[in-house]
Image (cartoon, rainbow, N blue to C red):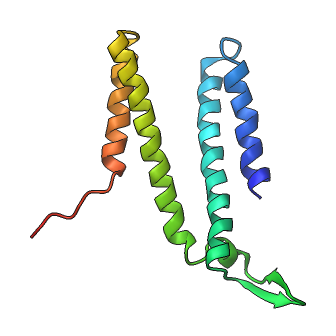
Amino acid sequence: MEVVTAFFVEVGFIGVLLYGDGRVHKGTTFLSSVMVSVGTVLSSTWIIAANSWMQTPAGFKVVHGQFEPTDRMRVIFNPSFIWRWPHMLAAVLISASFYVAGISAWYLVKGRAKGLARRSMSIALGIAALLMPRPALPR
């Protein structure tokens, strides 16, 4: 499922991003970047679902020594998936925001594309601030 629903989406649209620069409309480039992001989230969903099922299997029966699904929704959304997927998605978004902030800082230090670098830094640090866990305050 990961290959069919996510990998093909990522590969197709990343091709437009890499080889379409200056050849396709800016709206097409933006749509391609959004679709690569959607494909990445779908990919992570299937990968975490498979890994979570291996840790806490659910929705199956054993027939002749082999696992046979009985409830596909329980197979995908098993008990540990509910905790693993949001945790992984938040971690990836925080990492990506610091990556973008680092590139923006480099551009600001070099004095290149200051407007874009400031906007990128602001958005990246804002997303990181929203997503990062905060320690509990003492009472």
Q: Nearer the viewer, residue 109 or 60?
A: 109
At 77% from the left and 43% from the top, the residue drawn is 8
- Looking at the image, residue 46 sits to the left or right of residue 34; the answer is right
Q: Quadrant of the C terminus?
A: bottom left
Q: Nearer the viewer, residue 90 or 28?
A: 90
At 64% from the left and 38% from the top, the residue drawn is 36
Tell me if residue 86 comes above or below residue 77 in the rendering. above
Q: Position of residue 57 (x, y in %)?
A: 67, 80
Q: Position of residue 28 (x, y in %)?
A: 65, 25
Residue found at the far right of this picture? 64
Q: Position of residue 134 (x, y in %)?
A: 26, 57
Count of numbered circles on the image: 0
Q: Position of residue 91 (x, y in %)?
A: 45, 52
- Looking at the image, residue 76 sits to the left or right of residue 130; the answer is right
Tell me if residue 76 comes above or below residue 66 in the rendering. above
Tell me if residue 84 comes above or below residue 115 in the rendering. below
At 70% from the left and 83% from the top, the residue drawn is 59
At 67% from the left and 71% from the top, the residue drawn is 76
Q: Quadrant of the N terminus?
A: bottom right
Residue found at the far left of this picture? 139
Say which quarter of the image contains residue 34. Answer: top right
Tell me if residue 77 comes above or below residue 36 in the rendering. below
Say which quarter of the image contains residue 35. Answer: top right
